[in-house]
Amino acid sequence: MKTSINSKKYICSDCNKTFQTETNHFGAHFGNCPHCKSNCAKVCVEKEAIEMRRIQHENFPIIKTKLVAFSVGSNYEYSEYKKQYMVKGIKEMEGIGGANVPVQTFVTGEIWLETNCLFDNQWNISDQSPTNANKRCFDWNGDINPRNNSNRIPHGHYLVITDEMREIRSNVKKCGYCGKHHYDSKVFCDSCLGSEYLTENQIHLLRLLPVAESDSKRVKLTDNEKAELLPLYVELQTSAKYEKHVKNHEKRVKDNNDKYNNAIEKAEIEFKGFKWLLDNNINTDNCIYYSHTKVFCFGWRSAMSEMVKKELKIKCKDFPYVIEFDKEKG
Ligand SMILES: [Zn+2]
Ligand SMILES: [Zn+2]
């Protein structure tokens, strides 16, 4: 939900401290935490944001599972540990901690996962979760040479992968171009075919793949698919059909009319104003028309004396538009 830009309260899940920041939405904030510098996703704690998340949970129910945080004595032990607990087919996220890399510290316990935005290797943890609230966790994450940790003990976390988690990642499909999630049986994304940035040889990226494999290479269009999609692409690139395009279109029609009417009005005032002055034999050498204010200004080249101004006022008393003298009102 977009709002006007103003200060909102956010919480940092790494240090649990709150801070104010300027945003135009109630979603996650990725700027560095002013307290601990972490760039983790910060959750908005304004009451509108909490209500927004409550409604979101009605449409995208949370999934409950368990997170296991571990640390082991050596890299050898780490690899043995991984063999034991790493689930087949899960994408791992392994890192070598740099001194400046913020460490997200996790604790073992039940966690609640958000399902409104899905990834193939990680999850957003709900702000309602009994443990590790508001953090983003990986299916498997290991830091094998942590520099923030004086003992350099390899550590990490993993999730207990449930059928529900597998199911949602295979049922929900993702577009390889715009990233939109689709919950039906469409084969191609229908949201971005009219995008002004989409080129003809990128259309195959719209092929929907389950979230679990959404980063996989998308195969090129078959001849049948081309026959179906290309005419639609051309139609959407050339006509205002999408809701967004229709809305823009209506606005552009109005803007175009306004621009025209405004220009005509300004030009008409300029023409009729000077015509009146010339027809009435007024000296216009020291007169300029300011189209942005629709004002005729006398004395713009050099200031006029009070007597000259007074006489001009008398001569122009029937002038139909606004006259100013040296930026003073006439
Ligand atoms: Zn912080
Ligand atoms: Zn798309």
Image (cartoon, rainbow, N blue to C red):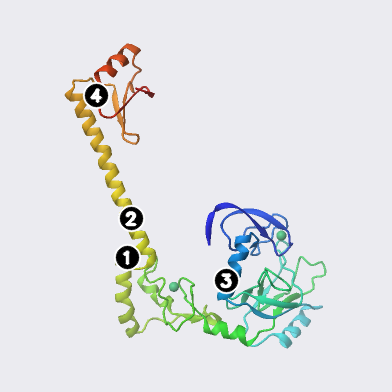
In this rendering, the label closer to the viewer, 1 or 3: 3
Q: Amino acid at mark 2?
A: Arg
Residue 29 can be seen in this image: no
Q: Secondary structure at mark 3?
A: helix
State the image coordinates of residue 271 (x, y, percent, origin top left): 22, 33
Instruction: Locate residue 129: give its quadrant.
Output: bottom right
Which residue carries the number 2 mark? 252
Q: Is residue 146 above or below residue 19?
A: below
Which residue carries the number 4 mark? 318
Q: Residue furthest left?
A: 279
Which residue carries the number 3 mark? 56
Q: Amino acid at mark 4?
A: Asp
Distance from disc 4 to disc 2, alpha carbons, whole Å, reads 39 Å
Q: Is residue 217 above or below residue 326?
A: below
Q: Secondary structure at mark 4?
A: loop
- Closest to the observer, 137 or 10: 10
Q: Amino acid at mark 3?
A: Gln
Residue drawn where x is 35% and y is 63% of the image: 246
Which quadrant does ligand 2 occupy? bottom left
Distance from disc 1 to disc 3, alpha carbons, whole Å, reads 31 Å
State the image coordinates of residue 99 (x, y, percent, origin top left): 73, 62
Can you tell which mark lies on residue 240?
1
* Label 1 Cα crowd, 10 Å radius (few <14 / some 14-19 / many 20+): some
State the image coordinates of residue 79 (x, y, percent, origin top left): 74, 83
In this rendering, the label closer to the viewer, 3 or 2: 3
Q: Does the closest atom of ligand 2 sit within 8 Å of the Cβ of label 2?
A: no
Is label 4 in contact with label 2 (beta carbons under 8 Å)?
no
